[in-house]
Image (tube, rainbow, N blue to C red):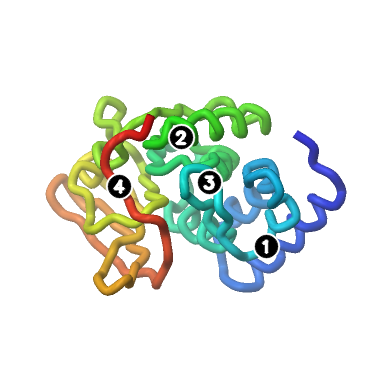
Amino acid sequence: MIDTALHQGRRRKMVKGLAAKDTYNERVIGAMSVVPRHAFVSAGLDSMAYEEKPLAIACGQTISQPSTVALQSHLLGDIRGKKVLEIGTGCGYQTAVLLQMGADVYTIERHKELCTVANGNLKRCGYGNAHLFLGDGHKGLPQFAPFDSIIVTCCANGIPQALTSQLAVGGRMALPVERGKGVQMMVLVTRISESEYRQEDIGLCSFVPMLEGVVK
């Protein structure tokens, strides 16, 4: 992976813009200052890697714009040494940010092609310690639960009960939820007790839909 002075300069500008736009956890800003986003975007899009926009990746999916990655990562709180479940690995960029923040990341991708792409990207950038699985994100990874945090990078029709059940007490889940008529809301779910959850609407967002099944 080549990280030139030009890439580093663009990354500094991206992070400066994020810091000016909102107040994010310092570990989020620190991680995004280090992770080479250009190494995760599709070929030919290198020059746009650090712009504030989502970009197309394989299988009709997207890599979220930097502010969305920062927001979802921030909503999880301090994840150093914590077990985090990610639904929707995509190209692996969000995974790398979580790893750089100090989390133990378990991530699921439903597209076999993207699993291969993400695995290559992560290893090439020195993040080969991710636990990457091909599977249906709706089901989560109950065999590894509970998770201290869960992040969903695709829009669900509602709060997936299989995922909330895998959240540890005191844990947080950040996910986009469909509210009808094309409106999506970023929601923060906190597990208060074994049977009680708190939901908080954070703001409007835009993600690809969360679909069932595995694409091989």
Tell me: residue 201, above or below residue 132.
below
Of the residues shown, which amino acid type is indicated by label 3? Answer: Gln
**Above/below status of 124 relative to 153:** above
The answer to which quarter of the image holds residue 136 is top left
Q: CA distance from mark 4 to mark 1?
A: 27 Å
From mark 2 to mark 1, how far is it between C-alphas?
26 Å
Q: Dot 4, crowdedness within 10 Å: few (<14), some or many (≥20)?
A: some
Q: What x and y, as percent, mark residue 55? A: 58, 56
Write down the residue under mark 3.
94
What amino acid is at disc 1? Answer: Glu
Give left or right: position of 53 versus 4.
Answer: left
In space, the residues marked 3 and 1 are separated at their CA atoms by: 16 Å
Write down the residue under mark 2: 105
Sequence-first disc among 4 and 1? 1
Q: Secondary structure at mark 3?
A: helix
Give percent across and percent down for residue 70: 54, 58
Residue 211 — which label?
4
Q: Nearer the viewer, residue 202 or 66?
A: 66
Residue at numbered disc 1: 51
Q: CA distance from mark 3 to mark 2?
A: 10 Å
